[in-house]
Amino acid sequence: MKPQIEYANNIITGRLIHIGEAQNGKRCNCICSECGKDVLAAQGQINEWHFRHVIETGCFGGLETIIHKLAKQIIFESNEIYSGSKLLSYKNPTKEQKFHTIIPDITFDVEGEKVFVEIEVTNPVDFNKESFYKKGNYKSIKIDLSDVPINISYKDLKRLVLRKAKREMIFWETINLPITNNLSDKKETPKPPLGLIDFFIENPIAALTALFFVAVAFIKLKNKLLYERF
Ligand SMILES: [Zn+2]
């Protein structure tokens, strides 16, 4: 039996909604999140409630990608997520907004710094994306939802995405800038070379030695002059 479609895209809000939130029939205003065709909400008394394509196409409603889409929606509509080591409060989340050469699943700001989130459901995070984050020193997290059952409730998925699911930091390093304060800023000014007088003041023994040689030279010169006179 074909799996039931529990979530579809509401064309008015742009959100994925659960069949339980939808209005019955075509009033649900929903399209299939996989193929984009119209669906209706089948909320009968016999079968489990589900969305059904208005025109049957053989599409399964993107059951594998639905977890991925829901996870993005959950992060987009929240403001706190566990990073793997601490709880991050974030602002300005965006979904699939191009950044240089890649399209991160989610981007948000933490204390003025961009943080990227990747969600793994069926496919692991693209190797090129991972190396992009590492090479660029971009703070990034990946969340592993590969074990999540397809019929998980929205509430349980939310708890997994934001807190409990296995996750790891692709890159996370606080670059240690040198601590700048008044003390370390003040560099010791190198001493200018000493003048000859300063040198002798600082070295009395050298001064005395020099004085001795000057005196000897003076006496010799005087004797020489005396000698030459006669
Ligand atoms: Zn479809």
Image (spheres, helix red, strand yellow):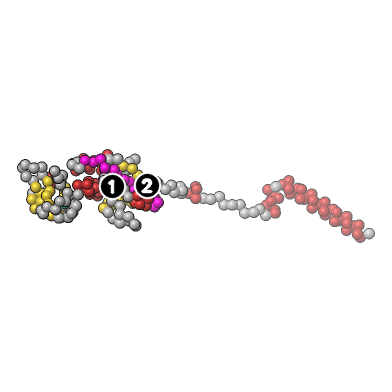
Q: Position of residue 18 (x, y in %)?
A: 15, 46
The residue sitting at the right extreme is: 230
Q: Position of residue 219 (x, y in %)?
A: 85, 53
Viewer-nearest residue: 188 or 23: 23
Q: Position of residue 142 (x, y in %)?
A: 31, 45
Q: Kindly tell me whether residue 111 is visible in this rendering.
A: no
Q: Kindly tell me whether residue 167 is visible in this rendering.
A: yes
Which quadrant of the figure has residue 221? bottom right
* Image position of 224 (left or right of 183): right
Please tell me whether residue 171 belongs to the stretch shown in magenta: no
Task: Name the residue located 34 percent from the left edge and 57 percent from the top edge.
Answer: 100
Residue on which the image places disc 1: 123
Q: Position of residue 224 (x, y in %)?
A: 88, 57
Q: Report crowding for label 2: few under 14, some 14 to 19, many 20 or more residues within 10 A (C-alpha).
A: many
Q: Label 1 vs label 2: CA separation?
A: 19 Å
Q: Secondary structure at mark 1?
A: loop
* CB under 8 Å between discs 1 and 2: no
Viewer-nearest residue: 25 or 204: 25
- Dot label at residue 194: none
Q: Secondary structure at mark 2?
A: strand
Q: Report crowding for label 1: few under 14, some 14 to 19, many 20 or more residues within 10 A (C-alpha).
A: few
* Image position of 159 (left or right of 206): left
Q: Which residues are drawn in magenta?
A: 134-149
Asked whether mark 2 lies closer than 8 Å to ligand 1, one says no
Task: Name the residue located 75 percent from the left edge and 48 percent from the top edge.
Answer: 208
Question: Which amino acid type is marked by label 1?
Answer: Asn
Residue on which the image places disc 2: 171
Question: Which amino acid type is marked by label 2?
Answer: Phe
Among the two numbered marks 1 and 2 on one chain, the one whose residue lies closer to the N terminus: 1
Q: Viewer-nearest of labels 1 and 2? A: 1
Task: Name the residue located 88 percent from the left edge and 55 percent from the top edge.
Answer: 223
The residue sitting at the top extreme is: 164
